[in-house]
Image (cartoon, helix red, strand yellow):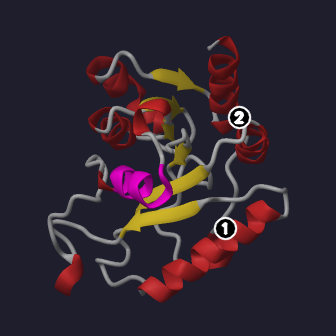
């Protein structure tokens, strides 16, 4: 049995965008994140973070350090009663990086490999699910996986808005994660 879910980009959507988040204490929740995530959780929608994390490929942090950042994110959210079903990330980069991490992969957004992995691991139906992100690449990954998408204007969202409107005009654009959750809530209640 499959179910719908909400996929969330990490940087610029759930947490404040920075050049690199290398330590847990660098995480800062984005405006509207907690209220939006709580609203989505009340809809009984599983929450899955999917994120490009090429800092691993570039040698800026090890997988274990990235896992510590994600453990801290889960703890921060749990303090507000928000629980993530999973956190999936792409550690690769096609041109930058060292060793096995420097590769053309299927999981780096705008490709949709992380969405398909999450769907397979957790029995999720992508066509009934949503992806909320702040970048064109998030919206492209959603489109490739036949997943509904919402662009938030936080993070890179304002800068990417014109390109998203041009390339993916069916994409809804909202101010922040709370507004995205309200949009999903309205869609769910009108269905």
Crowd rating for badge 1 (residues with CA inside 10 Å; few <14, some 14–19, many 20+): many
Picture layout, residue 54 above or below residue 9: below
Task: In the rendered view, tell whether residue 13 sits above or below residue 39.
Answer: below
Depth check: give the residue in front, 54 or 128. 128
Residue 118 inside the magenta-drawn segment: yes
* Range of magenta residues: 114-123
Left or right of 59, for residue 161: right
Q: Nearer the viewer, residue 11 or 117?
A: 117
Which label belongs to residue 178?
A: 2
Q: Residue furthest top?
A: 190
On the image, the x and y values in percent for residue 11 come to 52, 55
Kindly indicate the quadrant of the structure image that contains residue 113. bottom left
Describe residue 154's horizontal placement relative to residue 73 as left or right.
Answer: left
Upstream in sequence: badge 2 or badge 1: 1
**Image coordinates for residue 28, horizontal then vertical, percent:** 69, 61
The dot on residue 165 is none
Question: Image point 70% across, 17% down: which residue?
Answer: 189
- Residue 1 x, y percent position in the rendering: 51, 45
Residue 64 is one of the magenta-drawn residues: no
Q: Secondary structure at mark 2?
A: helix
Q: Position of residue 142 (x, y in %)?
A: 37, 37
Residue 90 sits in which quadrant? bottom left
Mark drawn on residue 73: 1
In contact (CB < 8 Å): disc 2 and disc 1? no
In depth, the one of 88 and 116 nearer the eye is 116
Q: Is residue 167 left or right of residue 139?
A: left
Q: Is residue 23 visible?
A: no
**Which residue lies at the image location 57% right of the left edge and 39% below the top edge?**
154
Disc 2: CA contacts within 10 A as few (<14), some (14-19) or many (>=20): many
Instruction: Describe the element under mark 1 as helix, strand or loop.
Output: helix
């Amino acid at each position: 049995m499959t179910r719908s879910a909400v996929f969330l980009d990490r940087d610029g959507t759930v947490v404040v965008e920075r050049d690199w988040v290398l330590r847990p204490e660098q995480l800062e929740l984005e405006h509207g994140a907690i209220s939006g995530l709580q609203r989505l959780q009340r809809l009984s929608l599983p929450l899955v973070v999917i994120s490009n994390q090429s800092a691993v490929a570039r040698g800026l942090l090890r997988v274990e350090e990235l896992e510590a950042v994600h453990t801290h994110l889960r703890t921060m959210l749990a303090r507000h009663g928000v629980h993530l079903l999973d956190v999936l990330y792409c550690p690769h980069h096609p041109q930058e990086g060292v060793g096995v991490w420097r590769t053309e992969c299927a999981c780096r957004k705008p490709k949709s490999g992380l969405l398909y992995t999450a769907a397979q691991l957790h029995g999720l139906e992508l066509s009934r699910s949503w992806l909320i992100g702040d970048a064109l690449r998030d919206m492209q990954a959603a489109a490739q996986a036949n997943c509904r998408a919402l662009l938030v204007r936080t993070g890179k969202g304002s800068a990417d808005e014109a390109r998203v409107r041009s390339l993916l005009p069916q994409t809804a654009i909202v101010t922040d994660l709370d507004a995205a959750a309200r949009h999903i809530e309205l869609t769910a209640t009108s269905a």
